[in-house]
Image (cartoon, rainbow, N blue to C red):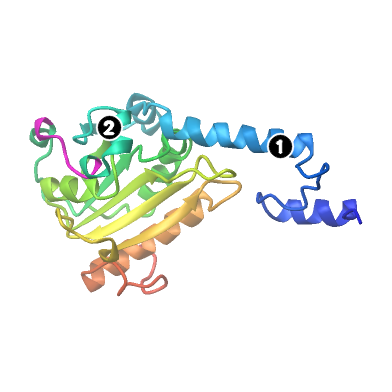
Amino acid sequence: MADPPALRDRLRALTQARVLLGRAGQGLPTRALLDFQLDHARARDAVHTAFAPERVAAALGRPVIEVRSRAADRDEYLRRPDLGRLLHPDDVANLSATGDTLAIIVADGLSATAIHAHAAPLVTALLTRLTDWRIAPIVLARQGRVALGDAIGAALGVELAVILIGERPGLSAPDSLGAYLTWQPRPGRQDSERNCVSNIRPPHGLGYDAAADAIATLLVAARQRRLTGVSLKPGTGALPG
């Protein structure tokens, strides 16, 4: 029995997941198959799209510092995740401690598409919530993994680092952005010592204001409790200002 069109439409309005696709013999209907192939191509494109830091810098309209990981190119980045966690030695000199409290790092991760779409408006929304914080120049990082923020934060001498990074694309979400917060960043920090706000991708995921509120709340709580990670739960701090 075919699914009632009204039920199918209501369910599809609630999610981007593939629901009630139907069938054509033993396979998918042509439209469902073509949609799947298109989304798969978009996910692959997101992984391989080259990061354009100048595009993000122009959208931010403020001074930035550009750095690289030790992954020489995209192919090596995908084959060697460990190199994406290490700061290129030639770029260490671009970073120096200035007595700031917070570093905001933007890294391509596994989806430069997400960074190009969402990083600048999210940073803008976050900065309006942190007007009384001492914030280092924003760092734009090529071929970066989450842990690259530890090396950058340590070089800048900050108390806290938040790295905004393109998340692994899904078949319905090639442009999802994640934010990872680390107290006293330094090489060797574990994932359990971070907090994450994920699926930032309006209108289908978390919006910029909601994400900025969540990140700012966690930053305030982290500074008060002098930690991040599994011991710091959402809702443990108050919004600044």
> Badge 1: few (under 14), some or many (20 or more) residues near its Cα, within 10 Å?
few
Q: How many marks?
A: 2
Residue 21, horizontal then vertical, whole percent: 77, 47
Locate the N terminus and report the quarter of the image it occupies.
bottom right
Q: Earlier in the sequence, mark 2 or mark 1?
A: 1
> From where the camera sits, is residue 241 visible?
no
Q: Nearer the viewer, residue 184 or 120?
A: 184
Residue 155, horizontal then vertical, whole percent: 11, 46
Return the residue at label 2. 76
Residue 237 higher or lower than 172, as above or below: below
| Magenta residue check for 87 | yes
Left or right of 174? Residue 48 is left
Left or right of 218? Residue 91 is left
Return the residue at label 1. 33
Residue 133 higher or lower than 32, as above or below: below
Q: Which numbered dot is residue 176?
A: none
Residue 225, horizontal then vertical, whole percent: 24, 73
Residue 127, horizontal then vertical, whole percent: 36, 48
> Badge 2: few (under 14), some or many (20 or more) residues near its Cα, within 10 Å?
some
Label 2: which secondary element: helix
Locate the C terminus and report the quarter of the image it occupies.
bottom left
> Who's the residue at 38% across and 54% down the image?
129
Q: Nearer the viewer, residue 189 or 184?
A: 189
Q: Nearer the viewer, residue 67 or 143?
A: 143
Q: What's the magenta region?
A: 84-90
> Who's the residue at 23% across and 61% down the image?
190
Q: Amino acid at mark 1?
A: Leu
Q: Amino acid at mark 2?
A: Glu
> Who's the residue at 81% across and 48% down the image?
22
